[in-house]
Image (cartoon, rainbow, N blue to C red):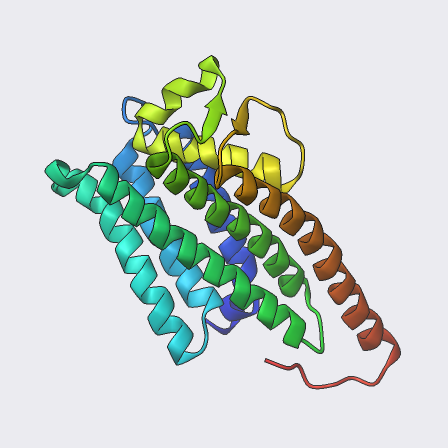
Amino acid sequence: MKRAREWKHVILLAALVCVFVSQSLASDRGTFSPMLHDVIVTIVMLVVFNVVFESRTARITAFTAAIVTIGCHWARHFLPEYGGVALAVVRDGAAAFFFGFAVVEILRNIFRRRRIRLDDVVGSVCGYLLAGAAWASLYSLVDHVVTGAFSISPSLSAQLAGWHSRHALFEYFSFVTLTTIGYGDVSPVRAPATSLSALEAVFGQFYVAVVVAQLVAVRLTQALGPTDPESH
């Protein structure tokens, strides 16, 4: 157990990679079971909860958002009559809050560190991926409530019809925006999608610049100065 805590962000990174891969493979008519993907989502959200959140207040808040998100995923299977737009909006809102809150906690922990280990560096990568997931949920929510918020190429528009393929599409758009690649096959054309995408692009650049600067500064202090107890 102690060994697992020392490499908790490595475990979290592996879990996030699994959920992103399964998300891209799952569809409502695909060969990769949507229910299996929802099992993976449930496990990953519990991993995020246990790895990232430490204080009692943060854990209560995060647990509430996680339960709402997980409940919406499973309600689609067992209460299909409630699986409409309202359920999707609640799911997207809760997921955006949960993942965004996780990013805030990861950044807070990074900036409190006085010593940097490999696992802390991996933790900053996890924060980047969770930020992309948070924005993806926001985009999905906006697309539900604002008609025509996005212009999507015909080759991708069919993905909007499925619960999982829809989330995979907006995760793709989110990370393309976060890294400022901008392929143009999915484009925001109406507010607030345009504002959110601009904010995500700015956030992505500042995240890399500021977090890397912090890690380098602490690492140099750690190498050149006296050894301090690790701050938690």
Q: Extreme front residue here?
A: 191
Q: Whole-percent x and y of residue 189?
A: 52, 29
Which of the two residues, 221 or 145, is positioned nearer the viewer here?
145
Picture layout, residue 140 above or below residue 25 = below
The answer to which quarter of the image holds residue 126 is bottom right
Q: Position of residue 204 (x, y in %)?
A: 65, 48
The part of the image, by quadrant, that contains residue 165 is top left
- Where 206 falls versus 114 (above or below)? above
Q: Is residue 231 above or below residue 40?
A: below
Q: Position of residue 49 (x, y in %)?
A: 40, 64
Question: How many marks on residues?
Answer: 0
Q: Quadrant of the C terminus?
A: bottom right
Residue 125 image position (x, y, % from top left)? 62, 53
Residue 54 position (above or below residue 29): below
* Drawn side of residue 146 relative to residue 155, left or right: left
Question: What residue do we see at 46% from left, 40% from top?
Answer: 20
Toward the viewer: 205 or 76?
205
Horizontal side, residue 97 vs residue 118: left or right: left
Q: Residue at x 45, y 13 (%)?
A: 154
Left/right of residue 140 with respect to residue 13 in the rendered view: left
Q: What residue lies at 54% left-to-right and 37% top-to-bottom? A: 194
Residue furthest to the right: 224
